[in-house]
Amino acid sequence: MKFFSLLLVLLLVTSGYCIITNQQGTGIAQPNKFIPLQHLVLYKFQPDTPPLQIHTMENMLHSLQFKIPGILQFTIGKPIEQQNELVGYQMGSTTLFANEEAYEKYLQHPEYKKVETFMSLFLDPKNGTLVFSYQFRD
């Protein structure tokens, strides 16, 4: 079901614009409010973080997709190799949101806040996360 939902969203946003018909019946191009947003995060933990806690954080992050509306897809994993600029980051996640509004609601959601608070106990205090979010181009 998730696949078909994602496919439908991708089909709706391929042009980046939708046509809205006014009362005269002429089409007016409007910016599409259904452009998905991709959110990537790399995580660097404190050196003494037990593996069990890291696994718990993975599970907490993974569960958010079932608790917060607007998440179309979520992936999480550990690096296959370390790039020079990214040495020390032990985990990464990607979250695909339906649009920017869904992303903004996610950041304010109480379930996200719980996970964020818990993870802050184990993340490196200087540079525990590296975040990059962007909207798809048309």
Image (cartoon, grey):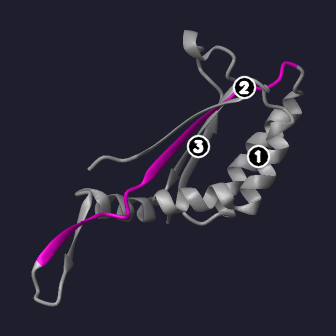
State the residue in front, 29 or 46.
29
Identify the amino acid type marked 3: Thr
Residue 75 got which mark?
A: 3
Magenta stretch encompasses residue 46 = yes
Residue placed under numbered mark 1 in the picture? 116
Residue placed under numbered mark 2 in the picture? 44
For the record, the magenta segment spans 27-47
Specify whether 33 is left or right of 131: left
Magenta stretch encompasses residue 56 = no
Residue 45 got which mark?
A: none
Quadrant of the rendered image containing residue 64: bottom right
Q: Residue at x 75, y 23 (%)?
A: 126
Depth check, mark 3 against mark 1: the one in front is 1
Task: Kindly check if marks 2 and 3 are in contact, taking CB atoms under 8 A apart as contact.
Answer: no
Identify the amino acid type marked 1: Glu
Residue 60, image x, y percentages: 77, 49
Identify the amino acid type marked 2: Lys
Which badge, 2 or 3, is on the more N-terminal residue?
Answer: 2
